Image (cartoon, rainbow, N blue to C red):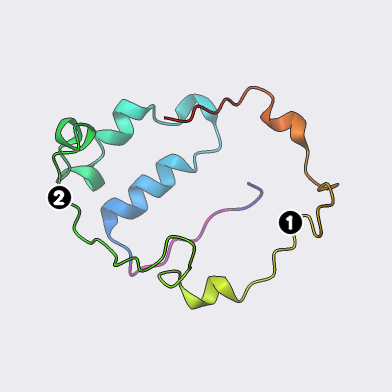
Amino acid sequence: MRGEAKIMDYFSKDFKSLIECLLEKNVARRPNIDKVMAHPFFKKIDFAKLEKKLVKPPFKPKIANLGKVSNAEKLWLKQELDQSPKNGEKNKTADSSLFKSFTYMKK
């Protein structure tokens, strides 16, 4: 990140604080997952119940067809996919070396 992030005033104090922690430039001062989960923004979340899938979601969208994007925000559907390869081409701008240590496990 090159500049300072501007967090709009209409967001809550806890949300602003969380985002500022997560965007900390100094890696040594960034919070670990335990500190993130203990942040006041998440005070109403019982992570033990959430992990066991015992928490009822506050909103469950109606999905007519898994292949459709009817629940996506219209704004995002209109944007160009300038980072996506076209017609089966390999994406020449992507630096795949950034992802060498990433793993993927299908559960």
* Residue at position x 53%, y 76% in the image: 75
Quadrant placement of the C terminus: top left
* Badge 2 element: loop
What residue is shown with label 2?
A: 56
* Mark 2 Cα-neighbour bin, 10 Å: few <14, some 14–19, many ≥20: few
* Badge 1 element: loop
Prevalent SS, magenta region = loop
Residue type pointed to by label 2: Lys
What residue is shown with label 1?
A: 83
Q: Position of residue 65 (x, y in %)?
A: 41, 65
Gap between marks 2 and 1, in whole Å? 36 Å
Q: Which residues are magenta?
A: 4-10
* Residue at position x 60%, y 26% in the image: 102
Q: Position of residue 8 (x, y in %)?
A: 41, 67
Is residue 65 within the magenta segment?
no
Q: Position of residue 63 (x, y in %)?
A: 34, 65
Is residue 63 depicted above or below 46 in this figure? below
Query: In terms of depth relative to the viewer, which is nearer, 91 or 64?
Result: 64
